[in-house]
Amino acid sequence: MRETEDLEGRRGFLKCMAWAGTGLVWTVAGGVPASVGLEAAAATRKARPFSFVQVSDSHVGFAKPAINADARATFTQAVAKIAALPARPDFIIHTGDVSQLSKDSEFDDADQIIKAAGVPVFHVPGEHDVLDEGNGQAFLARYGKGATGGGWYAFDHASVHFVALVNVMNLKAGGLGSLGPEQLAWLKADLAARGPSTPIVLFAHIPLWSLYPDWGWGTEEAGEVQRLLARFGSVTVLNGHIHQVQQKVEGRVAFYTARSTAFPQPAPGTPGASPGPIAGPPGKLGSVLGVRDVRFVAVDHPLPITDQTLA
Amino acid sequence: MSNKASHGGARRRLALVAALASVSGFVALTAALAAGPAAATIAIDNFTFGPPAITVAAGTTVTWTNNDDIPHTVRAVDGSFHSKAMDSADSYSFTFAKPGVYSYFCSIHPKMVGKVIVK
């Protein structure tokens, strides 16, 4: 165990507890992001250079008694856990589907709820957030200040470069998530200005890898994005959309999807299933959002692809 | 794209009525009138348009109903018609005036595709 800890500290091993709950706490030590479950984070007071939290798919406005009678309540629970963390995160990343139907009242409620965490929040839209007649203008007016074009942006925090991408606009019939040529050109220029040792964190709603294209779980330009990222030593890609933890490592790029705070969805390709809401165990929605998995993954070597379903 | 549902549909219905009257007489005429404006329905279940392809006469009003627990939309590939987001149990109707093949999809879940063939 001692050896593991030393390796983790000195050589920058990525420790990822793929936590299937209401949020993931990410810490960045030595330029290497790691994630642990909120419960585990609450149990430790180990100092880290900085941390941030990813939440996703709050679907405020979703209210189906058989699945989740009020997604506001479960989002509130998630935010309460964030607020109670002993090590205060520097910020929250919300990877989209803030709302169920892009209603102002839903965005208002979501803002009120997440405000309780007391830290800044960075948003990218999910497809549920761009359903207004203005094709996302309501979301962008609220969360897109300072963003470029269709809402994408980048920022630096403690030497880590964060890139927020939008892949839910102008989707084509039969297609996947899409960045579009303008955003791709912007991304290329943005990354070209960074040195290969700069840790990169990319986030977007729909998975930026071909997770399960039959259900639309992927992004058209995923291959081009991966080529742009290939020269960097540490890349972490955070997505939502599929309401479950999945991960994959491609070269030095690690992809993760997060759980929803509202409802689970089936594992990709479940026979007879569709990529829609499913119920948790009766009366125990929270129980399907518990700690699910622990992984140790070295980031300075080529890594095995770790596609994983959570049956 | 403009859509002249009432003009095109009315002309075709008149022509149909005239043809039926001349060939089959009074019984067929009353039957055609009793049928009223043509209508068809498409159900959205389990992330699928059912039926995924439907053939209707010009002037038919097609109504989609969302039976899923998640919102869907109906959007023509050529942009000629589109619904707002349909929440569970919401419906959307569109009257197809002109013959043609109208491909559409759900703009939220673009893997959902369908086709209305108007004769």
Image: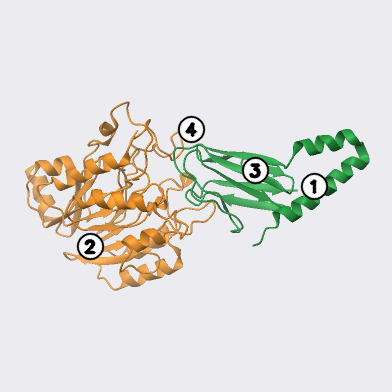
Q: Which residue is mark 4?
A: A272
Q: Is residue A96 visible?
A: no
Q: Residue at x 18, y 44 (%)?
A: A80
Q: Residue at x 32, y 26 (%)?
A: A282
Give the SS element for disc 3. Answer: strand
Q: Quadrant of the C terminus of chain A?
A: top left
Subunit ID for the residue under disc 3: B
Tell which of A141 and A170 is nearer to you: A141
Q: Amino acid at mark 1?
A: Arg
Q: Which chain is green?
A: B
Same subunit, tags 4 and 1: no
Subunit ID for the residue under disc 1: B
| Residue B68 coordinates in the image, percent (x, y) | 48, 37
Q: Is residue A87 visible?
A: yes
Closer to the camera: disc 3 or disc 2? 3
Q: Which residue is mark 1?
A: B13
**CB-based contact (under 8 Å), mark 1 and mark 3:** no
Q: Residue at x 17, y 60 (%)?
A: A31
Q: Residue B53 shows which numbered tag?
A: 3
| Residue A155 coordinates in the image, percent (x, y) | 25, 66
Closer to the camera: disc 1 or disc 3? 1
Q: Which residue is mark 2?
A: A199
